[in-house]
Amino acid sequence: MSIKFLDAVKYHQDLQHQIDAWQFLQASVHKEILDEFARRYRNEKVEPTLEGLPIPGVELIKEFEGCHLKAYYDPLTGGLPITIGWGSTSRKDGTRFMIGNKITQDEADDLFYHQLRKEFLPPLQNIPYWNEMNENQQGALLSFAYNLGARFYGSSGFNTITRVLKNKEWDKVPDALYLYHNPGTSVAAGLQRRRIAEGKLWRS
């Protein structure tokens, strides 16, 4: 038989079996969920920060992704992955969103920046000459990776962009980026615009 948490709180009498049950629940819940519960319980405001991120790339991602505070189906597949916020498909603890889930704007921003730092920047920083790139060049690759995968460099199907980055043929990067726009699909036009914008950012 299930129990609603609010009822459990309402009828709590500090009995030992109740204390044991609360301790069991706390030990079973992921730390990040407990931290989020504590933040909400204390009415603490999320303060998203852009520290350490190539800001031009973040802004470009926002321009093309858009922000949705209610979970929705993936536009390309019409199904999974279920997405929310700035194109996020999972929470900080890795659990997936479900249709009907909602978040606040601050939560969307915080999740977005967290995922950029944890999932996208580390693989990108392994690209040759990353530290020699300016913020706009890093931002262009961040946008590309956020759209097509954090580990695109060296992966199957990304031979051209991998080669020009490896050989430091930076003048060829915009044209290489443009190759990846899923021609013949319903999203091709949007991806063409995004690749052009990334190429323009790279050159600036």
Image: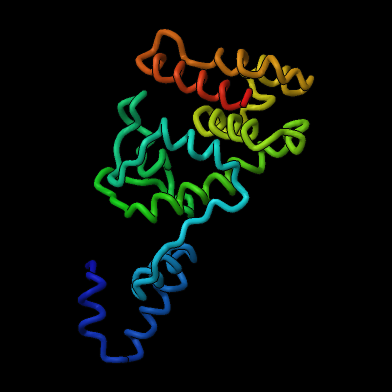
Report the number of numbered marks: 0
Horizontal placement of 144 versus 25: left or right? right
Horizontal placement of 78 versus 120: left or right? left
**Residue 112: percent from left, percent from top:** 47, 47
Dividing the image into 4 quarters, which one contains the C terminus? top right
**Residue 202: percent from left, percent from top:** 62, 26
Name which quarter of the figure residue 5 lies in.
Answer: bottom left
- Residue furthest out toward the top: 184
Query: Is the residue 93 above or below the residue 123 in the image?
Result: below
Q: Nearer the viewer, residue 135 or 116?
A: 135
Q: Nearer the viewer, residue 201 or 155?
A: 201
Q: Nearer the viewer, residue 29 or 193?
A: 193
**Residue 65: percent from left, percent from top:** 40, 33
* Residue 159 shows up from this direction: no
- Residue in the picture at 64% in, 34% down: 138
**Residue 155: percent from left, percent from top:** 65, 24
Horizontal placement of 55 versus 21: left or right? right
Q: How is the image coloured?
A: rainbow
- Residue furthest out toward the front: 204
Q: Nearer the viewer, residue 86 or 182?
A: 86
* Residue 57 shows up from this direction: yes
Query: Is the residue 47 above or below the residue 58 in the image?
Result: below
- Residue in the picture at 36% in, 23% down: 76
- Residue in the picture at 45% in, 61% down: 47
- Residue in the picture at 59% in, 46% down: 53
Dividing the image into 4 quarters, which one contains the N terminus? bottom left
